[in-house]
Image: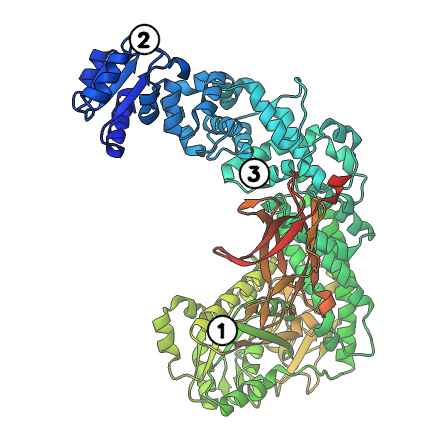
Amino acid sequence: MDVIEMLRERIREEKNKKERAVVFWYDTSSQETVESLQESLANEQVNVRELTKNNFFKLKIEIEIEHQEKSYLLYAPFSRPSDEENFLLDILLYSSEFKADQIAIWAEQLGVKDVILRSIVNHYPSFFNSKERRERLKKVISPSSKEEELEYGILAVLTGAPVASVSLITKYLLLSGLEEDHNEIYIKINKSFSIDRMWELVEQYFGLCLSEEQRTLRYLMEHLLYSHFSRDTVVEIKLLDGKYPTVRANICALFIDDWLRSKTDEVEVLEAYIKVMESDFNLRYHLQEKSAEQFDKISTFPLIDVLLIEKVTDELQHRTTDLEAWKDRISLRLSTHWGRKSKIAGLYRALFEAVRLTNYKIYLNQYDTRNELYGQYTTKLHMIDQAYRRFMQSYTRLEQREFVGPLAEILTNWYENVYLRKLADETNYLLSNRQPSKVPMQTGFFKKIIQPILEKGSTRVFVIISDALRYEVGYELCERLNGRINGEASISPLLASLPTYTQLGMASLLPNHTLTIEENKTVFADGEPTNGITNRTKILQIAHPDAVAYHLDELSDWSRVESEEKFKGKRLVYLYHDVIDAIGDSRKSERETYAAADKAIKDLELAVDRLSRLQAKRIFITADHGFLFQYSKVEADVKIEAVKGKIFDSNRRFAIGQGLNVPEGAVKLTEGQSPLNDTEIVIAKGLNRFTGGGGLQFIHGGAMPQEVIVPLIDYRRTERAELVEISVAMLDKVITNYRVPVTFYQETSISGDYLPRKIKAAFYIENERISNEVVFTFNLTGENHQRTEQLVFTLAETYYSMGQVCTLKIETVLDKKNEFYQEETFTIRMYEALY
């Protein structure tokens, strides 16, 4: 808007408010003439008169006596005289004065006080030469802005910051580079503002006191990063502490926290700075001899994770580690910025399982020879297999295996040469002494589990049979299913039929009284062939007419309408799933067995999801047999002579037929040790494999617990479970220090009815955050006193008046968005300010 347009608006304003307009314009720059004004205001019905130092009396008569109804513009090409010398003061007091110097116009446009803007313009005139900059300034300042706030606004415009915040201004400045000569924003500030003043404002905000030599962007970046580092360390580094002092360390640390949550491209710039300065600080020298607990909370530098990975790897190799502490430590690191990076996260996941496996070694030491092997396996020993499987799966996916290669060798050696051989000896003892097991037989599954449900009510039952889903894999699946919000799962063991292979295991899970086998490998249940979906459906329908069987893959291909049509009127649905056995039973792919186990878990979770959406209320998941997998090359001492005789079916672990010999390292099953009638069965002892075709690492057919113990998961659809409630467990909600520990209490233990609650919390004064954000998942179990957790918040260093109130705001973190959960009011009483 130009001067004339503003003048025109002022005249119209006066006319609207009063009967006529009388406007004075003292124009010190003499930028207009009476003639030009008359021409510009021709349509405004206003008389333009030039005010001189001698015509005041004439104008007074004209305005107040001769033409009281007309409007006037009194233009004076000089500055306004003092009130004592102004002979038209009485008219001026009831009329309006128009100020049309450029600064006054800008003040009006920006909505700030003239006197405040005038000082700023005088200091930084070049900034205001650009209309675009003035327009952008208006967007980032408030009408009540003081001089310093206007300076923030100017810096926001020059840096491109969306708001006039020193924090954002600094971030945008640093994003442009750390070399002043090549930083375009720094050059702009030097040209259109003041570098010295910028440094004063930055130092004031971050609590710094920099010398002229220290006023560099690189030193500022170092200072901010070191403050972030210092917040979470208990290590004293005198050299660095003295080089980077600040009285507002928490503000500096919060600045880095916020930057790390910025857009990806902005975070990448910060990450590049971090990697350079990590080396400059020589942190390895300062930290490598320190204990892990002295620096394990630091999230600034990736070197921290490297040092922790080296420490836990070394401690695990030399058996000097505090296992529980490392489990907690690794879980914490996986939630940090660098710990979430794929390469570091992969190492941590592998090491977490290595810690678990090392911890579970005690289960083998506690093995009680007075109790049966299979019962002890289902209570604790299976966790060793699970931890080793998950460790090796994580390890084989690593790009940098050299970090944990020696550890993998140690753990594999223990797993295969200590653990498996111990279980092999116990299995051989069990077979030779024909010790019965208390674990329920797989052959009784239909009669004891499924049939009573079908007889009792109208509930539709789904049975998913996943080939080679061994017990520990099923146990992990059960844990995951129990994390769902609309169901609960329980697991119990079944003892698979010997020999533990697919045809017999699948037959054992069908309705049956007697099982037999013919020379063509087909297993029969009460005279009916059990191979293939069609034959199995026929056997199921003999037991119950409203039964059907499908491959689980078909379910994923059907639409909801198709699924409902297929299951319409059915009381019993068997679904067959084959991932682990399909991968493991091939020599070409058997090394992918552990990855196949992970895929099987995901497949089955998805299947439960789909069935739940179809209102399935009862789902059983089990397996035909388990498997044994050895990652290392199988030694020659476990390869034994193949069985000879009339063989109906066989693999590396068993042979079924007539007139069979028993090679050294094998055993012939006696009557009652297998449900197959009228046949001979020879299985390899312990870890032995018969010579012949097929893979050597993935095996099943024998009596090792990993082969013979299968899971039976009972999943029930329930009403929607609730998230656990939490509360702040502090009677005295008073803050006396910038470091604020807050104790939370979890109201109930995690169960099928109550699921974990993930929260994000921070302190606020009104809508301004004054602390770091803390994210934590409450998934505690146990008694009341075991369900408390202390979270630590760090307040920004600023002046808080005694008795000032702040609010701890807590949100529930959900998949798609966060939801407000609760808030608690705290009172700030910084007593240390008194002494």
Q: Would you say 370 lies left or right of 233 here?
A: right
Vertical placement of residue 769 versus 436, above or below: above
Disc 3 is placed on an element classified as helix
Quarter of the image with the C terminus in it = top right
Where in the figure is residue 92, as x and y percent of width and height? 33, 22
Residue position marked by numbered label 1 in the rendering: 576
User: Along the polypeptide, which appears first: circle 3 or circle 1?
Assistant: 3
Where in the figure is residue 350, as x and y percent of width and height? 67, 52
Residue position marked by numbered label 2 in the rendering: 53
Where in the figure is residue 280, as x and y percent of width and height? 69, 28
Residue at point 62%, 63% (across, down):
726
User: Along the polypeptide, which appears first: circle 2 or circle 1?
Assistant: 2
How many angstroms separate mark 3 from mark 2 (CA)? 63 Å
- The residue mark sitting in front, 3 or 1, is 3
Within 10 Å of disc 2 (Cα), the crowding (few <14, some 14-19, many 20+) is few
Where in the figure is residue 180, as x and y percent of width and height? 56, 20
Q: Would you say 25 lies left or right of 146 here?
A: left
User: How many circles with numbers are drawn on the protein?
Assistant: 3
Within 10 Å of disc 3 (Cα), the crowding (few <14, some 14-19, many 20+) is some
Callouts 3 and 1 close, C-beta under 8 Å: no
Q: Amino acid at mark 2?
A: Lys
User: Along the polypeptide, which appears first: circle 3 or circle 2?
Assistant: 2
Which colour style is shown? rainbow
**Towards the viewer: 295 or 591:** 295
Vertical placement of residue 51 versus 691, above or below: above
Within 10 Å of disc 1 (Cα), the crowding (few <14, some 14-19, many 20+) is some
How many angstroms separate mark 2 from mark 1 (CA)? 107 Å
Residue position marked by numbered label 3 in the rendering: 259
